[in-house]
């Protein structure tokens, strides 16, 4: 900072109105000051504005007098704080520190939830730079459908123990009914381009093989095998072969009837509309069946479907499959292959799933999200959605409700 100059921070509070910023900066412009930093937040039309400027020492007194006079006319409160050279240099030095984004998501957010999350950040030596609300204003009537609340905290610093931070957030979320995402704030986070979904119990609220089994009269046996596989007690390949064999003799027409009555997960329509509108490539990578994946592909204009093919002879399921089994390992391989095909960095990919066979895919993606997942899956992922529909993914990507087209607010 040159000799003969002074740094002054002004803090302004009051009722916001059009033209207020223009008025303040026009006054500063008369003295040819340099703006070193600026930030503003509005909460229910109440303004909080900070401006750090550099001026000539001989002008600083006149600037403050002019601003005080203007503040009186505008009905706002203004305070002045001189900033030393050392304080400024320390602030500049903070630019090199790591930045993270903590997203908190729930049907409603309470002081207890925010207090718990911010206390965890403080214990890790992290400082909050900014907070913004991503969801629309929460209605007072909590009985209204699809109510959700989300805030995004911009955080600076280096966690003392990142794994412990993730673990603490996970336990807090489970205890207080809140979802969270803690991501490094890089350009890749802002430029996600490919998103891969599991199908059963993720895009749809059922396991299709269980639906088929019910029609074949072997529901109990298949459900028991499915649960063991989802808990990670047996390998997916082994369980898949056992379950498919039990479907032998089922009529092909049953598959169409199940497809048209698939229970779509809450938030899928809104999520798909927004992702397509903003240019994301979308894939289904499923241990389920191609027939149902293709039905969803047509319904939601999905770009890729990779799943398992059931063998059908003379209109009946044979109890066998065709081609390679899409298991957990194959899902991760397909995600990486699609990233190459779409020419995107792996850090720009997203994966969403609920079962143990989704873990390799979730780990390989730039952002892996466990959705209403089994305990083993939640314990091995850094982002989770448990309290609401699949469109909660949008908030982890940084979307605000106000960004979205009206058709995206389904």
Image (tube, helix red, strand yellow):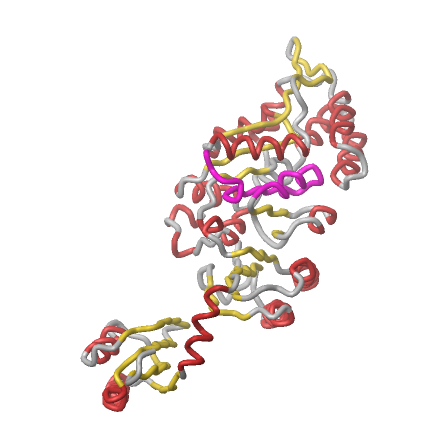
Residue visible at 37% across and 49% down in the picture? 405
**Location of the N terminus (image quadrant):** bottom left
Quarter of the image holding residue 172? bottom right
Residue furthest toward the left?
A: 30
Residue furthest toward the front?
A: 3
Most foreground residue, 223 or 83: 83
153 on left or right of 310: left
Percent position of residue 119, x then y: 63, 72
In the rendered image, the vertical position of residue 5 relative to residue 284, given as above or below: below
197 on left or right of 31: right
Percent position of residue 171, x then y: 70, 61
Percent position of residue 40, x then y: 37, 71
- Note whether residue 44 is visible: yes
In the rendered image, the vertical position of residue 42 relative to residue 386, given as above or below: below
Quarter of the image holding residue 264? top right
In the rendered image, the vertical position of residue 123 relative to residue 177, given as above or below: below
In the rendered image, the vertical position of residue 35 relative to residue 205, given as above or below: below
Count of marks placed on residues: 0
Residue 152: say if magenta.
no
Q: Which residues are magenta?
A: 343-365
- Note whether residue 149 is visible: no
Residue visible at 55% across and 45% down in the picture? 366
Residue furthest toward the top?
A: 314
Percent position of residue 345, x then y: 49, 40
Residue visible at 43% across and 71% down in the picture? 92
64 on left or right of 114: left
Residue visible at 69% across and 40% down in the picture? 355
Most foreground residue, 342 or 21: 342
Most foreground residue, 404 or 3: 3
């Amino acid at each position: 900072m040159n000799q003969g100059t002074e740094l002054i921070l002004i803090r302004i509070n009051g009722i916001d109105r059009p033209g207020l910023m223009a008025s303040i900066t026009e006054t500063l412009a008369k003295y040819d000051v340099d703006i070193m930093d600026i930030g503003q937040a509005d909460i229910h039309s109440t303004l909080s504005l900070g401006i750090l400027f550099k001026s000539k020492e001989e002008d600083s007194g006149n600037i403050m007098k002019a601003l005080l006079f203007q503040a009186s006319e505008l009905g706002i409160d203004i305070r002045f704080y001189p900033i030393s050279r050392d304080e400024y240099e320390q602030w500049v030095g903070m630019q090199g520190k790591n930045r993270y984004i903590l997203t908190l998501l729930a049907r409603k957010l309470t002081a207890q939830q925010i207090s718990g999350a911010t206390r965890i950040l403080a214990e890790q030596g992290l400082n909050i730079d900014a907070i913004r609300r991503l969801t629309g204003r929460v209605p007072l009537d909590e009985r209204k459908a699809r109510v959700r609340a989300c805030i995004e905290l911009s955080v600076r610093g280096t966690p003392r123990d990142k794994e412990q931070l993730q673990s603490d957030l996970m336990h807090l979320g489970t205890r207080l009914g809140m979802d969270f995402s803690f991501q490094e704030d890089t350009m890749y986070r802002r430029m996600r381009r490919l998103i891969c979904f599991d199908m059963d119990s993720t895009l749809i609220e059922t396991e299709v093989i269980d639906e088929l089994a019910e029609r074949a009269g072997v529901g109990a046996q298949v459900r028991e095998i499915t649960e063991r596989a989802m808990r990670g007690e047996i390998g997916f390949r082994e369980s898949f072969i056992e379950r498919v064999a039990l479907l032998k003799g089922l009529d092909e027409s049953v598959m169409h009837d199940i497809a048209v009555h698939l229970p779509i997960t809450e938030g899928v329509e809104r999520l798909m509309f927004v992702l397509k509108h903003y240019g994301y490539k979308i894939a289904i990578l499923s241990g389920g069946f191609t027939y149902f994946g293709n039905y969803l592909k047509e319904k939601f204009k999905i770009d890729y479907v990779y799943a398992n093919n059931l063998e059908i002879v003379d209109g009946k399921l044979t109890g066998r499959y065709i081609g390679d089994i899409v298991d957990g390992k194959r899902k991760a391989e397909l995600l990486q292959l699609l990233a190459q095909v779409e020419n995107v960095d792996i850090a720009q990919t997203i994966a969403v799933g609920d079962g143990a066979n989704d873990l390799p895919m979730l780990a390989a993606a730039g952002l892996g999200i466990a959705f209403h997942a089994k305990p083993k899956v939640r314990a091995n992922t850094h982002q989770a959605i448990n309290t609401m529909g699949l469109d909660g993914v949008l908030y982890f990507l940084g979307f605000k409700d106000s960004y979205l087209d009206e058709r995206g607010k389904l």
